Image (cartoon, rainbow, N blue to C red):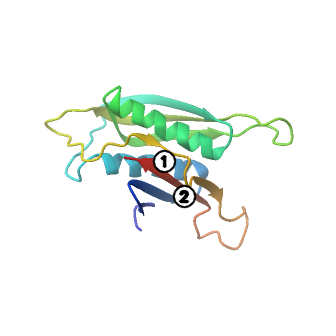
Amino acid sequence: MSSGYEVLEHTADIGLRAFGDTLEEAFSLMAQGMVKLILSPESCISHQEERLVEAKGYDPESLMVAWLSELLFQIYSEGFLPGAVLSIKIREPEDSSADPGEYSISAVLSGETFRPETHQLVLEIKGVTYHMLRVERLNQPGSDEDHEAKWFAQVILDI
């Protein structure tokens, strides 16, 4: 698995798994994997435009659903194909002992407007599900496993 994400076979749907050194990297890889599923391998996305994309959730899992759902909105409703995540920042609640806080993600994406002569859509993703959804830390900071991925994410996409 050289790309940092892998396709997860699932009956009637399709899933993705990503492994990242940081939570931000795991979210970025999930976005990259989802876009690669939607477009044919021959489709190339240039970096003509930059967009700020933001989403919120009440925990890392709901944030992942909101993040990928916002990307689907950008693709299917706005006609914007994200080609790369230029910067990404995830904010966690200040105090987890109090009432549940809000997680947020803010990312700058580069990409371009969908052009049928250049881009071939091969898979329509209808939505992001909570089925088998996981976003979790694999090891703690400073552990002996520093060479391993530290974050794991998994999502099932409705097709």
Please indicate, yes or no, whether residue 9 appears anywhere in the rendered image. Answer: yes
Residue 62 in the figure: left or right of residue 155: right
Earlier along the polypeptide chain: callout 2 or callout 1?
2
Residue at figure coordinates x 39%, y 48% from the top left:
34
Front residue of 131 and 16: 131
Three-letter amino acid code of the residue under disc 1: Ser
Name the residue rendered at 51%, 45% in the picture. Answer: 129
Q: Residue furthest right?
A: 97
Residue furthest to the front: 12
Give x and y (percent) for residue 135: 61, 53
Tell me the quarter of the picture where residue 12 sits.
Answer: bottom left
Decide which of 48, 94 is in the foreground and name it.
Answer: 94
**Helix, strand or loop under label 1:** helix
In the picture, measured across the screen, residue 68 lies left or right of residue 58, that is left
Residue flagged by tag 2: what amino acid is it?
A: Gly
- The image shows residue 156 at horizontal and vertical percentages of 47, 52
Compared to 8, does 43 lie above or below? above
Query: SS of the residue at dot 2?
Result: strand
Query: Where's the N terminus, which quadrant?
Result: bottom left
Q: Which mark is residue 28?
A: 1
From this viewpoint, which residue is outermost toward the top?
A: 78
Any part of residue 108 in sight: no
Report the residue at 86% width, 42% height from top: 97
Residue 77 rendering spot, x and y as whole percentages: 35, 27
Q: Can you tell which mark lies on residue 20?
A: 2
Q: Residues within 10 Å of mark 2 (few under 14, many from 20)?
A: many
